[in-house]
Amino acid sequence: GGTMGIKRVDDRHTVASLKMKGTIYGTSRATLSPDGKTMTVESEITSASGGQPVGKQTEVWVRK
């Protein structure tokens, strides 16, 4: 199965390790804007074992 380990770096930053069957296949870094309305997530998938395509992806989430 898949698991995710999340570590809080500070008030606005987290780092997550993505694992499948005990092996890390990617990492994600999230940054929350100072006003708390926007979160940017940068993910890097290094192995296709998680079912996602290999490569980098950036997502921006905006609170309404």
Image (cartoon, rainbow, N blue to C red):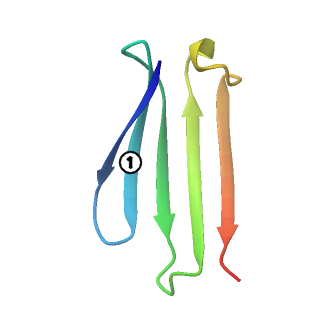
Quarter location, residue 51: top right
Quarter location, residue 5: top left
Using the image, determine if residue 19 lies above or below residue 29.
Answer: above
Which residue is depicted at the point 42% across and 12% down? Answer: 21
Which residue is depicted at the point 48% across and 64% down? Answer: 31
Quarter location, residue 53: top right
Question: In the rendering, at what x and y percent does residue 23 appear?
Answer: 40, 14
Question: In the rendering, at what x and y percent does residue 4 appear?
Answer: 41, 35
Q: Nearer the viewer, residue 5 or 47?
A: 5
Using the image, determine if residue 4 lies above or below residue 20.
Answer: below
Using the image, determine if residue 34 lies above or below residue 30.
Answer: below
- SS at mark 1? strand
Residue matched to label 1: 15
Using the image, determine if residue 45 lies above or below residue 28.
Answer: above
Which residue is depicted at the point 66% across and 28% down? Answer: 55
Q: If the image is split into quadrants, where does the C terminus sit?
A: bottom right
Q: How many marks?
A: 1
Farthest residue toward the front? 1
User: What residue type is disc 1 on?
Assistant: Val
Residue 7 falls left or right of residue 18: left
Question: In the rendering, at what x and y percent does residue 59 appear?
Answer: 68, 54
Which residue is depicted at the point 28% across and 66% down? Answer: 10
Residue 64 falls left or right of residue 9: right
